Image (tube, grey):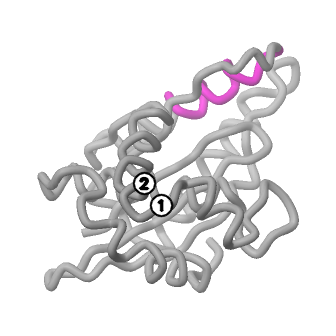
Amino acid sequence: MLIFSTDPGTKHFAAAFTEISDSGKVRVVATGMISNTIQDLTKDVCKQQDLFRSEIRQLFRKYGKPDACCFERFQSRGNGGTLIECVNIMLGMLIVDTNKFNPRIITAATWKNRINMHLKSIGYSLDSMYSDNKLHSKKSIKQIHELDAALIGMYRLYDVMNYSHFAGFEDQVQDYVSRFLSSPNL
């Protein structure tokens, strides 16, 4: 089973492909940042959307069509401007383009609260995962947003498998992060 997941933004739009084998082994296939995003509604929006959709289609040709998708819903944090509009346009296009792949949209709190609940039992947190692995929004081997996209894919994987979200993840977090860090870029 192949999951496609995203952590959207106009400048930092991360995507991930996660796979689970028939034997139950989870693999982060690839993560990376989408280059062609909609960033300016005063410029040629059609050209921007064509480039965005083309990049997503290229990823599906390279990694395969997913069995399920999960996208983080963008919620405004007082950023102002057209940021939320641009991201929601891209989310709308993703839903249309992946409607055959069982897409879901979730809030950040939905998956972050669940993973943090499980990580707390080992004295760990999502923020610890970022800092311990030197993940940042810029200039790091992998960006924070890429890990978020991959974990959103894990959330969806638990959902599809009908398991309690992130149950047992605390026992495999270090192995998962190592596999994430060594996964190829999109």
Residue 175 vertical placement versus 84 (above, below): below
Q: Please give the name of the residue rendered at 36% of the width and 63% of the height, measured from the top-left corner.
A: 65
Q: Residues within 10 Å of mark 2 (few under 14, many from 20)?
A: few
Q: Quadrant of the N terminus?
A: bottom left
In this picture, which residue range is highlighted in magenta? 81-92
Q: Is residue 114 left or right of residue 74?
A: left
Q: In x, y percent, where is residue 172?
A: 36, 76
Residue behind mark 1: 123
Q: Residue at x 66, y 19 (%)?
A: 76
Amino acid type at mark 1: Gly
Q: Which quadrant of the structure image shows residue 110?
A: top left
State the predominant SS element of the stretch in magenta.
helix
The residue located at (71%, 63%) in the rendering is 131
Q: What residue is disc 2 on?
A: 120
Q: Does 38 appear above or below 167?
A: above
Which three-letter amino acid code belongs to the residue tagged 2?
Lys
Q: Is residue 33 left or right of residue 163?
A: right
Is 23 positioned to the left or the right of 180 in the image?
A: left
- 84 within the magenta span: yes
Q: The residue tagged with tag 1: helix, strand or loop?
A: loop
Q: Is residue 73 above or below residue 56?
A: above
